[in-house]
């Protein structure tokens, strides 16, 4: 295995591989480890579960429609 640089060793000491950090803690660690002479940026990827949310809304609307129909039929 190749030797790690001082910077890489410092990063590996501060970060646990495979751990999911809360956003506040992750930003704090990133600002502590920043060493560039320019403004660094971070990309964040997230998965939206829109299909699930839309399905729930659709089911709620159908349930509401059925209750209205039942009330009208009485």
Image (cartoon, rainbow, N blue to C red):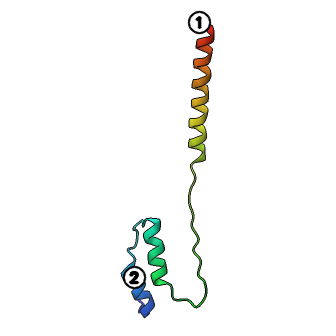
- Residue 56 position within the rendered picture, expressed as x and y whole percent measured from the top left: 56, 36
Q: Is residue 17 above or below residue 66?
A: below
64 w.r.t. 40: above or below: above
Instruction: Quarter of the image for the N terminus: give it.
Output: bottom left
Q: Position of residue 19 (x, y in %)?
A: 39, 68
Q: How busy is the neighbourhood of tag 2: few (under 14 within 10 Å), some, or many (20 plus)?
A: few
Label 1 crowd (10 A; few <14 / some 14-19 / many >=20): few
Mark nearest the camera among 2 and 1 is: 1
60 vs 2, nearest the viewer = 60
Q: Tell me the quarter of the picture where residue 42 sits.
A: bottom right
Q: Give SS at disc 1.
A: loop
Viewer-closest of 32 and 5: 32
Return the x and y of residue 61 as percentages of the image width and height: 61, 29
Residue pictured at 42% horizontal, 90% vertical? 4
Looking at the image, residue 47 sits to the left or right of residue 24; the answer is right
Residue 22, horizontal then vertical, whole percent: 43, 65
Q: Nearer the viewer, residue 59 or 40?
A: 40
| Res. 74 mark | 1
As rendered, which of 48 and 34 lies closer to the eye? 34
Task: State the residue at coordinates (44%, 87%).
Answer: 8
Q: Residue most toward the top?
A: 74
**Location of the C terminus (image quadrant):** top right
In the picture, the disc for residue 39 is none
Against 69, is 26 above or below?
below
Q: Quadrant of residue 43?
A: bottom right
Q: Are marks 2 and 1 in contact (CB under 8 Å)?
A: no
Q: Give the CA separation, mark 2 to mark 1.
A: 70 Å
Q: Residue at x 40, y 77 (%)?
A: 15
Which disc, if any, is residue 12?
A: 2
> Mark 2 falls on what kind of element?
helix
Of callouts 2 and 1, the N-terminal one:
2
């Amino acid at each position: 295995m190749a030797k790690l640089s001082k910077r890489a060793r410092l990063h590996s000491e501060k970060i646990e591989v495979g751990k999911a950090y809360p956003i506040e803690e992750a930003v704090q660690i990133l600002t502590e480890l920043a060493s560039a002479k320019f403004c660094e940026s971070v990309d964040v990827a997230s998965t939206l579960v829109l299909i699930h949310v839309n399905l729930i809304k659709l089911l709620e609307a159908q349930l509401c429609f059925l209750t209205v129909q039942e009330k009208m039929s009485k």
